[in-house]
Structures are given as C-alpha cells and as structure tokens.
C-alpha cells in the first residue's frame, strides 16, 4: 500500500493543547490569589469585603466525590462545597467523552509535571524509565489510594457525608488546603521536593504512580467512545508514536488504545509521519476527532456544567459570613473528625 507523507511540522494539536493547559493554569492562579486574599481579610481584619471564589473547590476532589454521592442519594444539591461536586462531575464527564482529558488538557499538576519532564529531557537529553517490575508495582499505588478514598465515600451514608462537610473541619477544608502550601512543614516540603525532582527524570512521576484522582479519571475514561486508532496497513512501523507517548503505551503495536493510562494528549498523532494512519477516532462512527474538537469539547463541558451551576444559584457554598469569621482565625484547631 502506498502511503502519503504527512507534514508533522504543520500539526497544531500540541500548540492548541498547550494553550488550553496554560489558560487553565492561569484560571487556577487567578482563583488561588482571590482565595488567598479572601482568607487574609478574615485573618487580618476579621471580616471579608470580597466574595469567596467557589472555583477553589476544584482542589477538593474528595469533597466533590462526597457531594456527588450525596446528590445521587438525596436529589439535593449540597449546601457546603457544591462547586466541588460540579467540578468533579465536569472533569469526569470530559474524561469519559475525550479519554483522560482532565489529566492531559486541564489539570495544573499534570501541566507542571509535563513541563518538568520536558525540562529534564531537554537538559539531560533523555528521560529515565523504571524497570518494568517496578513500574507496574508503583502504578498500582494510585489505584490502592483511589480504592481507599472511594471505599471511604461509598461506605458512608448520605447524612454522614453532609455532617462531615458541615463540620468545622469540612467547612474550612479549602483553607486547610491553602495552609498546607502556605505553612509547609519540613516533611511535606521534602516530599514535594522529592516528587518534583523525580518528575524531572521520570515522565509524569506523580500522575503515573501516585495520583488517586488520575486513577479514578483513567478508569472512567475507559468508557470513552473515542480512542487512538492505528491503521496497520498504512503504518510504516517507525515507532515514533510509541517513543512520543508520555504514558509509554505501545502505540506502534496496537490497533486501538484502550488503556486507562491514555491521556488523550495526541502527542502520538502529532509525530506520525503518515497521513490518516494514527488518529483519535470516534469509534462508533469511525470518524476522526481533530484536536480542535477535543479542545472545544473539553472547554464546553467545563464551562457548560460550571455555568449551569452558577446560573441556577448552586455554585456558592451556602455558609453565613459570621461562621467564617469564627472559623478562619481558629482553623489550626480543627482536625479530621
Ligand atoms: S496513546 Fe497517544 S494520546 Fe494516548 S497518552 Fe499516548 S501519546 Fe497521548
Ligand atoms: S508513528 Fe506510529 S502509527 Fe505512525 S507510522 Fe510510525 S509506527 Fe505507524
């Protein structure tokens, strides 16, 4: 079979993905600064003039899971951290539709991780790969962590979930998260430092081995109607796709990528030198899904679900100001109930 050469240089998928990733990082920084200023007002002046940005609840995925279960069991939108639920649902939905796209296109930790291993590759001319036995063993860690959190949420009745989130600890879980980064102890700082250094050498170290959220999103992505498909007839077996894959999937040897590790990042498609040989494909319709459609789809799901929550008045945590005035200055007193 004759093959048609494809212009790899003209591929815009990675520029587009980078733009979406950086826009999401910028959104997180904006929300983070607003949240920090809101907390500082309670600490310094005892009251806040500005509003709390609910988007910060994207950093509370366990609260998101708890509230999703609460909503499914009661039909009521929870009073505390409802945005965590809407963001959790948005990220899972985007990943069911477009593979593990939350990790590959949106997550700021995934983006930082990607920049770190690319820095390592540019500096040392290579990344390092753990031996297969260790790689497989470590990869199971994130599923064990995920199983622990899922079990904890699934085993609690709806009333107990609401009581947990409405406890002093649950109400200021976001402030506790901020304080983890603001007042990091030596042990936590060393752990974060080790993870960052490991990420320079090993691609996506945190995401690949330890992130329970990514593990859950990956399992959900196996329901996706889109997946990378390779045309074995036109493939010239150059293996460029497998070499480019940050999830280390054997793209050059498979006809379809069904793995829970596939990030939907299109790095493999971007480097394939043969026209119409490697494509993200809508499997039921056998139609290729271009990068712009993934970018638009992920953005639409995110904006659609969060926008609907805002428009229906379900976005803000329904906690009176006087409660925050009491709780935030005493946040160190509250521990996990
Ligand atoms: S198979 Fe392709 S889309 Fe999936 S993670 Fe690897 S490079 Fe990205
Ligand atoms: S990049 Fe992968 S799919 Fe494309 S021709 Fe080479 S081996 Fe085949």
Image: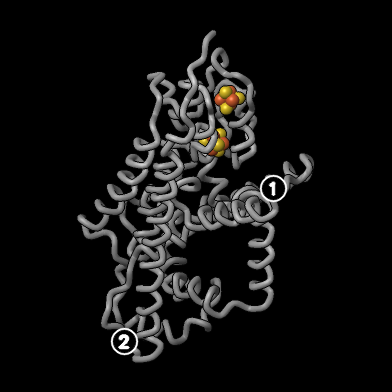
**Residue at position x 48%, y 29% in the image:** 227
- What kind of element bears circle 1? loop
Which residue is pictured at 38% across the width and 91% down the height?
Answer: 44
Residue 280 x/y as whole percent: 46, 29
Q: Are marks 2 and 1 in contact (CB under 8 Å)?
A: no
Q: Is residue 145 among what the camera can see?
A: no
Residue at the extreme bottom of the image, as rendered: 45
> Which label was assigned to residue 47?
2
How busy is the neighbourhood of tag 2: few (under 14 within 10 Å), some, or many (20 plus)? some
Q: Residue at x 40, y 44 (%)?
A: 16
Q: Quadrant of residue 158?
A: bottom left
- What percent of the width, then of the height, locates residue 46? 35, 90
Give the residue number, with chain letter if any, for mark 1.
126
- Disc 1 residue crowd, few under 14, some 14–19, many 20+, Cα 10 Å: some
Vertical placement of 286 versus 267: above or below?
A: above
User: Which type of secondary structure does the marked residue at label 2 adopt?
Assistant: loop
Q: Is residue 184 left or right of residue 45?
A: right
Name the side, left or right, on which 319 lies relative to 165: left
Give the number of marks. Answer: 2
Which callout, 2 or 1, points at the residue further toward the start of the chain? 2
Q: Where residue 255 sits in the image (x, y, percent)? A: 57, 20
Question: Would you say the beta carbon of the disc 2 residue lies within 8 angstroms of ligand 1?
Answer: no
**Residue 337, position in %: x, y?**
54, 71
Disc 2/disc 1 C-alpha distance (Å):
52 Å
Q: Horizontally, is 283 left or right of 186 in the view? A: left
Q: Nearer the viewer, residue 256 or 64?
A: 256
Task: Give the number of the disc on residue 18.
Answer: none
**Quarter for ligand 2?**
top right
């Amino acid at each position: 079979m004759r093959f048609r050469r494809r212009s790899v240089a003209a591929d815009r998928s990675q520029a587009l993905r980078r733009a979406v990733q950086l826009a999401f990082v910028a959104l997180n920084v904006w929300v983070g600064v607003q949240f920090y200023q809101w907390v500082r007002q309670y600490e310094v002046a005892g009251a806040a003039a500005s509003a709390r940005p609910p988007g910060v609840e994207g950093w509370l995925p366990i609260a998101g899971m708890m509230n999703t279960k609460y909503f499914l069991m009661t039909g009521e939108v929870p009073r505390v951290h409802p945005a965590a639920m809407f963001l959790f649902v948005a990220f899972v939905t985007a990943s069911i539709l477009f593979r593990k796209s939350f990790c590959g296109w949106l997550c700021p930790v995934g983006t930082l991780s990607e920049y770190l291993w690319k820095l390592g590759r540019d500096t040392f001319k290579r990344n390092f790969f753990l031996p297969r036995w260790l790689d497989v063993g470590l990869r199971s860690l994130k599923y064990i962590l995920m199983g622990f959190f899922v079990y904890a949420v699934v085993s609690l009745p709806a009333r107990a979930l609401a009581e947990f989130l409405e406890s002093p600890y649950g109400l200021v879980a976001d402030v506790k998260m901020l304080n983890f980064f603001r007042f990091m102890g030596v042990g936590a700082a060393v752990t974060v430092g080790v993870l960052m250094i490991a990420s320079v050498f090993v691609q996506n170290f945190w995401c690949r081995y330890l992130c329970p959220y990514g593990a859950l999103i990956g399992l959900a992505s196996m329901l996706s109607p889109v997946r990378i498909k390779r045309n074995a007839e036109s493939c010239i077996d150059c293996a460029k796709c497998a070499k480019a894959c940050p999830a280390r999937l054997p793209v050059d040897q498979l006809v379809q990528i069904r793995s829970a590790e596939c990030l939907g990042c299109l790095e493999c498609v971007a480097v394939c030198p043969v026209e119409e040989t490697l494509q993200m494909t809508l499997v039921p319709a056998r139609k290729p899904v271009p990068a712009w459609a993934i970018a638009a789809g992920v953005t639409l799901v995110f904006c659609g679900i969060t926008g609907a929550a805002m428009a229906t008045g379900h976005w803000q945590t329904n906690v009176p100001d006087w409660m925050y005035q009491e709780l935030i200055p005493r946040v160190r007193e509250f521990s996990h109930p």
